[in-house]
Image (cartoon, coloured by chain):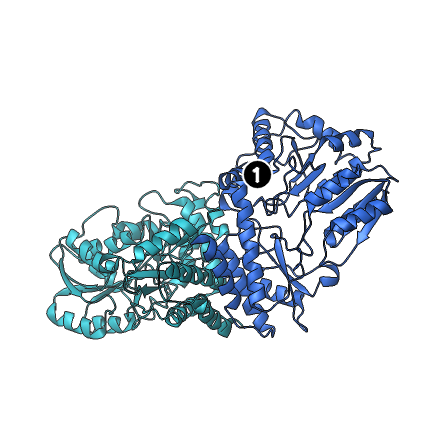
Chain colours: A cyan, B blue
Amino acid sequence: MKKLHLFTPGPTMVPGDVALAGAKDMVHHRTDQFYEIYEECAVKLQTIFETKLRVLTLNSTGSGAMEAAVSNLVSPGETMITFNGGKFGERWTKIGNAYRCNVHEVKYEWSDASTPDKLEQALKDAPDTVGVFTQLSETSSGVLNPIKDLTEIAHAAGKLIIVDAISGLLAHPCPMDDWDLDVLISGSQKGFMMPPGIAFIVLGPRAVEKMEKTDRTGFYFDLVAAIKNDAKRTHPWTSNVSLFQQLNVALDMLLEEGLPNIHKRHEIQGEAVRSAADALGFKRLSEKFPSNVLTPILMPEGIDSTKVAKFMRDEWGIFMAAGQNDYKTKIIRIGTIGYQDYFDTIMGLAAFEMAMKKFGAPIELGVGVKAAQEVFMSYLC
Amino acid sequence: MKKLHLFTPGPTMVPGDVALAGAKDMVHHRTDQFYEIYEECAVKLQTIFETKLRVLTLNSTGSGAMEAAVSNLVSPGETMITFNGGKFGERWTKIGNAYRCNVHEVKYEWSDASTPDKLEQALKDAPDTVGVFTQLSETSSGVLNPIKDLTEIAHAAGKLIIVDAISGLLAHPCPMDDWDLDVLISGSQKGFMMPPGIAFIVLGPRAVEKMEKTDRTGFYFDLVAAIKNDAKRTHPWTSNVSLFQQLNVALDMLLEEGLPNIHKRHEIQGEAVRSAADALGFKRLSEKFPSNVLTPILMPEGIDSTKVAKFMRDEWGIFMAAGQNDYKTKIIRIGTIGYQDYFDTIMGLAAFEMAMKKFGAPIELGVGVKAAQEVFMSYLC
């Protein structure tokens, strides 16, 4: 028997009711039937993004929304500040370069965060920057960045802040309106409990104003066209109809749970995995700035995380991500987002213990599980 | 978030691919399209039942096949021996009574089995019996009966043996041809990883011969009609088409795993749950005759298993069955059949530990999980 259990930071597990909604009868995207689904989703998304603004949807993954943010807000030759403390911070740099922007990249160790002092220094070094491009949660390192603080600093300098919350939204609060963000981005295959394929982007008034003055490049990710079509409850291109039918169901489930409960759930999940790692004596890469999206566990000397991940995946159907770039073989990332409950997390930790023991880590089985059980019981009982 | 995890001895969890097959286009049951599906299933079922005989299918649950065995093989007033060591042994008695048979019931403690000595005594006490009606695995008590031995004793006395392997098939070997059984029964919602709705029944030559001489009662469960229709690859009534489309997929998955591997999987699962229960210091009802279908764990003094089961189900989405009849409040039955892998079982054990601790059992969290991890690792690593 080969059953699959996903503990990856996206794609995540999808509820059966959401999966089934993808098999509903196809409707045409230029019809009232679709406009109604579109608008139902759009309204529900405002609760998730904590905004009165429109949440635009793109037929792409989150990376498409990142690209749209750059290509619509930064003219070729204009300066943008990026924080490269991981693979996805690096992605802002790569996108900026691909659009011939002048990228001022702040690079630092993956265990570190986009701290206020780093932003203050960057604004001094690149005073002509259009905006600050960062992540809520950096998926490659499991680091949570202090978006609220960064936003205040960026705004004090008269700069835009563009937040990739692709994996971070729903796992951590990131209120668009309360924090007065300029751009907030997410993707469907993370906390939304959805398959991949829809990107979300909210533009604040300063971003819209800047966009209108930008020498914009590109067609598919043209956000002016997206805004114009959104007013008609549609997209510039063919809408991904079946994914919207699924999104409508997933959003109902999320709204029924309620945003505060969703944030609390991820907080408990993160605490449980961190407790388990600590009880087992493992070090965590993002110890100083832990995200609840995932917990990156550092391998003891001599254990290659890609081999552990491959073994768990191929032999047991347990999917956990190894690392990326310099940390490729050095960490196992245990995800805690999507359709994953507390008992799934215990299962993942038990499998992780067994695999680590098999690969020679000096641990006692059950110790991490017990620590997680205790965290869950302190909230559930 | 409310996710459901089934550790019940049927219905069990169903693979996504099997669930999806139930959404295939409907075909009419009196067409070549359906006859082909029917026959594909029939051939695959011969491997599962380890027989060259035809495996008949009924549009009912397993209880329907039990009823068919009685109504087709025992004339009103004829004697049948039943073993009542649990709810399903008792069901043979009830069915016999409903068909006005002369039921010779052997009743005993639920921790006990249908042992050879009990059958020998029953055959002395009811020498005119037509046959012996028993269970491979008694779902209410978690007891495994020695079917091979019972068959030899029944046949030495010239009597038929009718085996309800509804929950037991696939979890334990029960080869129709090798053991020369007369009737072997199962149901779809157990080891088959299927939704409920199809019953299976195989009739050996002695059973067919007796059936032809029986003063048979009833229409829907008329096995003479079933045999006649089976020759035309159809049923006397409307076939449950979508379930057959699912069964065809489920059987492919089972045959790919292979019968010896399936038996081994259940053996390992049973051993793991028993180890966990023992490590936690709990007594098991079926300690002497443990089935791998489920493990019934006796509650410590003062803990009501129906409350534990209800709490796990309502609060956590963890489904385990409490007891039945006299054991209603005294046991939790942890099932290990259907689409349930080793890591699911660990999850179930972790939840069970947490619930028992909450209800005041003097246990240490993680101890049962560790015992199960060790069993799994001894086979998997």
Q: Which quarter shows the C terminus of chain A?
A: bottom right
Query: For this rendering, which residue is in front, B140 or A252?
Result: B140
Residue A139, image quadrant: bottom left
Query: For this rendering, which residue is in front, B81 or B190?
Result: B81
> What residue is drawn where x is 74% and y is 48%?
B116
Q: Which residue corresponds to mark 1?
A: B247
The chain ID associated with circle 1 is B
Query: For this rendering, which residue is in front, A238 or A242?
Result: A242
The reply to whether residue A203 is in sight is no
Q: Is residue A112 left or right of residue B217?
A: left
- Label count reads 1
Q: Is residue B195 above or below residue B4?
A: above
Q: Is residue B304 above or below residue B81?
A: below
Q: Percent x, y for residue B95?
A: 79, 45
Q: Percent x, y for residue A362?
A: 36, 66
Disc 1 residue type (three-letter)? Leu
Q: Percent x, y for residue B308?
A: 62, 67
Q: Percent x, y for residue A10?
A: 36, 55
Q: Is residue A359 left or right of residue B166?
A: left
Q: Is residue A221 left or right of residue A44?
A: left
